[in-house]
Image (cartoon, rainbow, N blue to C red):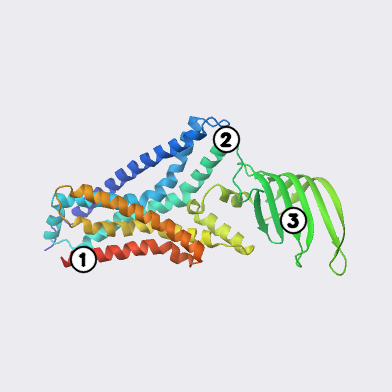
Amino acid sequence: MKLPLGKTYQRYLFREVFFATLLVLAAFLALFGFFDLINELGSIGRGTYHIQHAIIFVVLTLPGRIYELMPIAVLIGSLFALSTLARHSEITVLRASGMSTRELLMTLFRVAALFAFLTFLIGEFLAPPSEKLGQRIRLQALGMPLSADFRTGLWVKDENRFINVRTVTPEAKLLGIRIYEFDDQQRLQMVSEAKEGEYLPTSEWRLNSVEQTILEYDAKGQPVRGRVAHQDEVMWQSALNPDILSVLLVVPERMSVWNLTSYIKHLSDNRQKTQRYEIALWKKVVYPLAALVMVALALPFGYSHNRVGGVSLKIFSGVMLGVFFHMLNGLFSNLGIINSWPPFSSAVTPSAMFLLAAMGMMWWVERR
């Protein structure tokens, strides 16, 4: 028997799940935004950092929160909408009217696809620049340099050169620069020290107050003497640029696909480890699709008809499943880095596990 209402029920389900997900997402953003603001209160009063800076910083980090929380919000929103429909026997009426599980799942996939697309857009175009701007505003107000990997500053390898930068300002200006240049036989050729460096529109750095120590070798490759040269200004070509330095402001999981690809290429060209960034790149591709997995996981709950406390229990289950999914994502990323697993496997395994769980639950519900 076919449904007499045609696609009316599809629009109805779409609307219910869509607005329930937005409501859950808004609640999550309010909660996380509140805790982020509380966390920033400890920094107020340092430098010129005031409450308005903390509020701006928290607001600018919200797109990243949306990206992180979207699949969980889709899961809980779908659970809430389907549980409410089941409680009022609307799912039963639709199934009695001839609606199959496949048709219901396809309807849920449509709304999930919309959220997956929004997740990708936010993660690719909105969250990275917003996160970067927020970090710059915060660091400028606090009067702090960017973080570095070592206590001696930032270290970067560029072909046959090792670059040490004591301080990187939020404007991507370099302070306290040392450049160690080696030849093809790994012999140190020159050490350059500069007071500061500024990146120019011509894609090169202008180094100021430069002192160069040049080493000379004999025919046997033994150092024979060194000489020191002083220059007020030196133009320096390097693969290091503000885009690479901006990696310090944004964690790999919040970077755009373009920036991740460029940075992976830079690391590969310099024979450095790329595992963490490759995993982050695959997660950027796979993570938005988690919304499709979440609605498939929520559907079996909609077929139960608990009338007393059923909705609350399912919402609690959704929160627990969402937390578990978030933890698995972080766990497999770290395990992938530690054990050198294939980046694609590390990124896709949590979603694949939840998809298998959804298929198993669907099969069990259909068998009942």
Q: Earlier in the sequence, mark 2 or mark 1?
A: 2
Q: Which residue is mark 1?
A: 364
Residue at (45% x, 65% y) in the render: 344
The quadrant of the image that shows the C terminus is bottom left
**Number of residues whose C-alpha sits closer than 10 Å to that of mark 2, classed few (under 14), some (14–19) or many (20 or more):** some
- 175 sits left or right of 141 in the view: right
- 205 sits left or right of 276 in the view: right
Whole-Å distance between the Cαs marked 3 and 2? 32 Å
Q: Amino acid at mark 2?
A: Leu
Residue at (35% x, 43% y) in the render: 28
- 85 sits left or right of 52 in the view: left
**Residue 223's quadrant in the figure?**
bottom right
Q: Which residue is mark 3?
A: 180
Task: Locate residue 351, reporting x and y percent.
Answer: 37, 61
Whole-Å distance between the Cαs marked 1 and 3? 64 Å
| SS under mark 2 | helix
User: Total marks drawn?
Assistant: 3
Task: Locate residue 124, reporting x and y percent.
Answer: 47, 52
67 vs 339, nearest the viewer:
339
The quadrant of the image that shows the N terminus is bottom left
Whole-Å distance between the Cαs marked 2 and 1? 56 Å
Q: Earlier in the sequence, mark 1 or mark 3?
A: 3
